[in-house]
Amino acid sequence: MPRMLDVSDEVRAEIGDEEADRLLAGDNAPGSYDCTSCRTPGDSEREPTSTVLFIGDETAVLAFAHAGCLPSQVVQVTEEQLQGAVRSIGGDIPPGAPPPPP
Ligand SMILES: [Zn+2]
């Protein structure tokens, strides 16, 4: 299996060896994701991908980015910014979009 996912030591220290290894093994890999930097779609199975851990006041969120956009790193953010990041990463249906067909 190709290892396209990069988990830096910094990120590994925060999420723990077990979680880092799970990610690298592909169990928790996102597959396709929206790059947290350039917002365009990426695919962790086909493109070099960096894990980026956003740490807020109370919660932490693991996000993904093209390796060419951001290196794997830990980013300290405010809780407010974290919520914004979660929203953008979650790929919620934008307001006004028609409901999905049944
Ligand atoms: Zn990107």
Image (cartoon, rainbow, N blue to C red):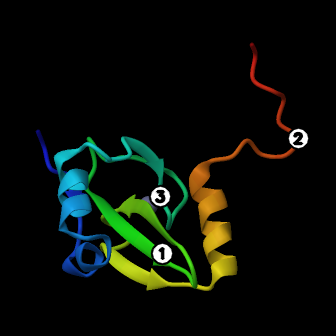
Give the structural element (helix, strand or loop) at label 3: loop
Q: Which mark is residue 96?
A: 2
Counting from the top left corner in percent of width and height, residue 29 is at 32, 47
Cα separation between marks 3 and 1: 14 Å
Q: Residue at x 11, y 39 (%)?
A: 1
Q: Earlier in the sequence, mark 3 or mark 1?
A: 3
In the rendered structure, the answer to whether residue 3 lies left or right of residue 51 reads: left
Give the structural element (helix, strand or loop) at label 2: loop
- 71 relative to 4, above or below: below
Residue identifier under label 1: 54
Cα separation between marks 2 and 3: 23 Å
Counting from the top left corner in percent of width and height, residue 14 is at 31, 77
Q: Are marks 2 and 3 in contact (CB under 8 Å)?
A: no
Toward the top, the furthest residue is: 102
Dot 2 beta carbon under 8 Å from ligand 1: no
Location of residue 102 (image quadrant)? top right
- Looking at the rendered image, the disc whose residue lies closer to the viewer, 1 or 2, is 1
Of the pair 32 and 47, the residue shown nearer to us = 32
Q: Earlier in the sequence, mark 2 or mark 3?
A: 3
- 35 relative to 13, above or below: above
In the rendered structure, the answer to whether residue 24 lies left or right of residue 51 reads: left
Residue identifier under label 3: 35
- 84 relative to 90, above or below: below
Q: Residue at x 44, y 62 (%)?
A: 63
Label 1 CA crowd tier, 10 Å (few <14, some 14–19, many 20+) = many
